[in-house]
Image: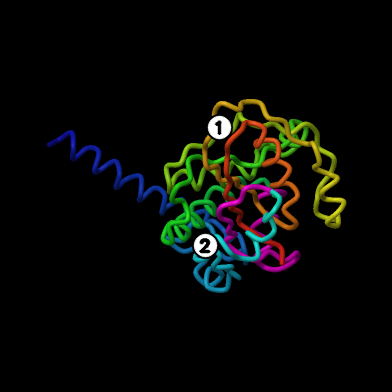
Amino acid sequence: MLFISFFISMGLLTEIAVRAINIISPKPCAMCGCRLAIGEDVICSSCDIDLPRTHYSQKPYDNEMAKIFWGRIPIEKAAALFFYRAHSLSSRIIYSMKYLNHPEVGELMGRMAAEEFARHGFFNSVDAIVPIPLAKKRLRERGYNQSLEIARGINEITGLPIINNAVNRKNFKGSQTQKDRWQRNENVEDEFILKNAFVLRGKHILIVDDVVTTGATVTACATAMRKCGEIKFSVMSLGLTK
């Protein structure tokens, strides 16, 4: 009984400590920057309501995001949490995660998205998660892979294993941000290389990225993975450029 009481008290102390830290040094909302209240992890309740959700997880087989990949890869389902628009309030989520050294935003948003998507059975039949890899140079510069951070959040909710050694990215040729559709395709063409076919063969893989615009990066990564043989894909991202 004393043993159980000890861990209960430790858990209570941990919760109290976390609350105390949040009071002394409160976390800001990843969208508006305002102080998060107790129980808010990454964005505040007001921004959560205003987040421009796609609701594509409710219709994952036939939506505008899924159509991006039709005829390009063997796509099953596709969904993004919200519509992405540069310089909008919600774009600060992506900016904070990628450029302001806040990998925890990716993990927390991954958890948030996974909780919502799971209610609609989005992860049913998926076998594993493959986050879009970064080139070694880009990984050294940033210090982390934002897509892997998102995948970790998804893993926490779904329990789906993360496969992070099946495909590598050769080189970083520059950001996709300012490129048009054709330049994006050229920028990532033959950019990915299959390293471990065995762990992918015969599986339904969920490819995870931060933002999908033309689908060029996801398609290039999936094309490399298809060399393993029989495989099918679903795609999940935080943002979808509209």
Which is more toward the observer, 45 or 3? 45
Residue 238 x, y percent position in the rendering: 61, 56
Amino acid under disc 2: Ser
Q: Secondary structure at mark 1?
A: loop
Amino acid under disc 1: Arg
Q: Which residues are magenta?
A: 73-99
Quarter of the rendering containing residue 56: bottom right
**Residue drawn at x 86%, y 45% as measured from the top left:** 186
Dot 2 corresponds to which residue? 57
**Residue drawn at x 61%, y 41% as measured from the top left:** 131
Tell me the quadrant of the picture where the C terminus can be found. bottom right
Which is more toward the observer, 213 or 6? 213
Residue 184 x, y percent position in the rendering: 82, 50
Q: Is residue 140 magenta?
A: no
Colouring rule applied to residues: rainbow
Classed neighbour count for the residue bearing mark 2: other residues with Cα under 10 Å, few (<14), some (14–19), many (≥20): many
Q: Is residue 92 magenta?
A: yes
Residue 87 x, y percent position in the rendering: 75, 66
Quarter of the rendering containing residue 220: top right
Q: Is residue 111 left or right of residue 54?
A: left
Q: Secondary structure at mark 2?
A: helix
Dot 1 corresponds to which residue? 201
